[in-house]
Image: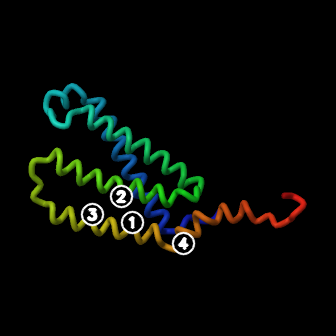
Amino acid sequence: MSRRPLPVTILLGMVLCLTAWNAIRLGTSLLSWPILAEVAKRPGPLYLAITGALWTIGGWLLWQRIRRRDQQARRWMAVYLFGYLAWYWLDRMWFRSAFPNWPFLATFTFVIAIGIVYNLLHPTTARYFCRRENYEQSDSNPRTS
């Protein structure tokens, strides 16, 4: 098995960090349910648990696709990572009354998005996910078809 290229490793690290973060979010919301129900009226522990579970499950499924070098993994990485950025901003706008550091966060989000696009479109990333399929279809012997 060949080594995973650096752009794929970076994207995988982003997916695993978000998956772990949301697993912690899910666990914390379940363990602290009574306290959150009393203190955090909006959005409440149910929202925290559901979103934590969805992003954790999505990250785990994506990790499986990346590990198997699925040809659709790049597309699903884009959906997962950009979906997370969009959800992050929607969550901030709906449930935070004020966030004065929005210019910094917007700039940081833009930089992260550029990094995601660069790594997803990097030629070694495309080769990494296509190599398995090319290997599986390399049988040119007409008698075995």
Q: Secondary structure at mark 3?
A: helix
Alpha-carbon distance for marks 3 and 4?
24 Å
Q: Give SS at disc 2.
A: helix
Residue 98 vertical placement versus 46 (above, below): below
Badge 2 amino acid: Phe
Q: Amino acid at mark 3?
A: Thr
- Disc sitting over residue 124 in the figure: 4
Q: Quadrant location of residue 4?
A: bottom right
- Position of residue 6 measured from the top left corner of the image (x, y, whole percent): 49, 68
Q: Residues within 10 Å of mark 3 (few under 14, many from 20)?
A: some
Mark closest to the chain's N terminus, 1 or 4: 1
In whole angstroms, how far apart are the C-alphas of marks 2 and 1?
A: 8 Å
* Mark 2 or mark 3: whose residue is earlier in sequence: 2
- Quadrant location of the N terminus? bottom right
Q: How is the image coloured?
A: rainbow
Query: Which residue in the structure is indicated by mark 3?
Result: 109
Q: What's the amino acid at mark 4? A: Thr
Assess disc 4: are there few (<14), some (14-19) or many (≥20) residues with their C-alpha within 10 Å of its C-alpha: some
The percent position of residue 137, horizontal first and vertical second, equals 73, 62
Q: Say which element carries label 4.
A: helix
Q: Alpha-carbon distance for marks 1 and 4?
A: 14 Å
| Camera-side residue of 13 and 55 | 55
Kindly report the distance in space between the C-alpha atoms of the residues bearing marks 3 and 1. Answer: 10 Å
Q: Are marks 2 and 4 in contact (CB under 8 Å)?
A: no
Q: Which residue is mark 1?
A: 116
Residue at 33% across / 66% down in the picture? Answer: 113
Of callouts 3 and 4, which one flags the residue occurring earlier in the amino acid sequence?
3
Q: Is residue 119 left or right of residue 124?
A: left
Q: Residue at x 40, y 43 (%)?
A: 56
